[in-house]
Amino acid sequence: MDKTPRDSALITDRRHFLGAATAIGAIVATAGHGTAIGVSVANAQTSAGGAARTTATGPVLTRTIGRTNESLPALGLGTFLTFDLLPGRNRDALREVTRTYVHAGVRVIDTSPLYGTSEVSVGGFLSAMGVTDQMFISNKIWSTGNYLADESHALASMEQSKLRLWRDKIDLFHCHSLVNVDAIVPLLRAWKKEGRIRYVGASVHENDYHHILAGLIDKDLVDFIQVNYSIFNRNAEERILRAAMDKGIGVLTNMPLEKGRLHKIVEGRPLPDFARDIGAENWSQFFIKWAMGHPAVTTVLAATSNPDHAAENVGALRGSQPDQSMRQRMARHMETIAGFTNLASMQWYPDKQSMYQGVIRRSQAALRQRMS
């Protein structure tokens, strides 16, 4: 199996482009003994409005991070591309996605100033729900200043993020995609010492940079990492996850659904019978629960702009989780499905290229036109 997915068909990734308050309070306080919205669908994700919703009960699955003693839900909301809309466009679907996640017990949201209008929407939705201060916000930065050790651009970026998200302090700042890592990580560590942020992190979404991320872990330079990890792409297991677990570092994982490509592979296929053993009612939960099942993983970040897909995703936050034997069985099953081993050659979000047309895609299109 190819463990190094590359997305040559679309220049959409971040490195390549530029080089409700009481409800959630009760959920957190009671370790999630509320209900989550799920769907009973045994195929790929349904289209908007097509999901039949059911109710999943039980405690919210949480993980406590050894180094920080922070306890977080095992599912978080990712926002790259999916939350980037052109100003003035209707945001009702994104508002409902956020509401679905929050009411299910999710309180980890990952965003970035590089995600177009994502921060603006996240901040507005959480403020309107009255849950801003109850959320664990994971954010990112990669700029520093006009010269070596100048932090002016970084400070401006942080202040802008605080304004958009309506927070006086951001919980976690990552060095985004390890860009300018030798300057950014020391700066973030200084900010943490000064009380400007709570935790220091570093993020990647490509296998090629795992060795650099591992070096930060080995040197005890970060409290959290964010890494790409899925039932298809298991490269992080080779060193990253083991090292993070040994060091007690928090692990956020991205791309658990491989940007819609996993769903495309299983489109029209029923879940295997053994999926019921882990309470997976749809393919989204099957894939997300697989990632959650690794003992080093703190929170799996699953992104969507579709409220019905959000309802599917949050069902993974409750119920049984797969042990190592079951995870191996799940992976073996996927390896029998035609096209799975060639997933890396597929475009991100197959058949959905027209959906995510925000400021990122607009700027990319303009740049391509200038270069043509």
Image (spheres, helix red, strand yellow):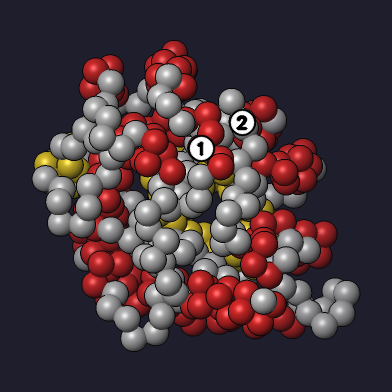
The residue carrying mark 2 is 2
Does residue 180 appear to the left or right of 85 in the view shown?
right
Closer to the camera in the image, 237 or 199: 237
Does residue 116 appear to the left or right of 352 in the view shown?
right
Does residue 40 appear to the left or right of 69 in the view shown?
left
- The residue under the point 76% across, 40% down is 211
Residues at discs 2 and 1 in contact (Cβ within 8 Å): yes
Looking at the image, tell me whether mark 2 or mark 1 is earlier in sequence order. Answer: 2
Closer to the camera in the image, 366 or 282: 366
Tell me the CA gap for discs 2 and 1.
Answer: 9 Å
Work out whether residue 52 can be spotted: yes
The residue carrying mark 1 is 343
Q: Position of residue 94 (x, y in %)?
A: 30, 67
Local SS, label 1: helix
Work out whether residue 244 can be spotted: no
Quadrant where the image shows the C terminus: bottom right
Q: Position of residue 105 (x, y in %)?
A: 29, 50
On screen, 296 above or below 21? above
Give the amino acid type for the residue marked by disc 2 in the picture: Asp
Q: In the figure, residue 286 lies in which quadrant?
A: top left
- The residue under the point 20% across, 57% down is 48
Give the amino acid type for the residue marked by disc 1 in the picture: Leu
- The residue under the point 51% across, 45% down is 346
Q: In the figure, residue 121 lies in which quadrant?
A: bottom left
Quadrant where the image shows the N terminus: top right
Q: Position of residue 229 (x, y in %)?
A: 54, 38
- The residue under the point 78% across, 63% down is 180
CA neighbours of label 1 inside 10 A, class few (<14), some (14 to 19), many (20+): many
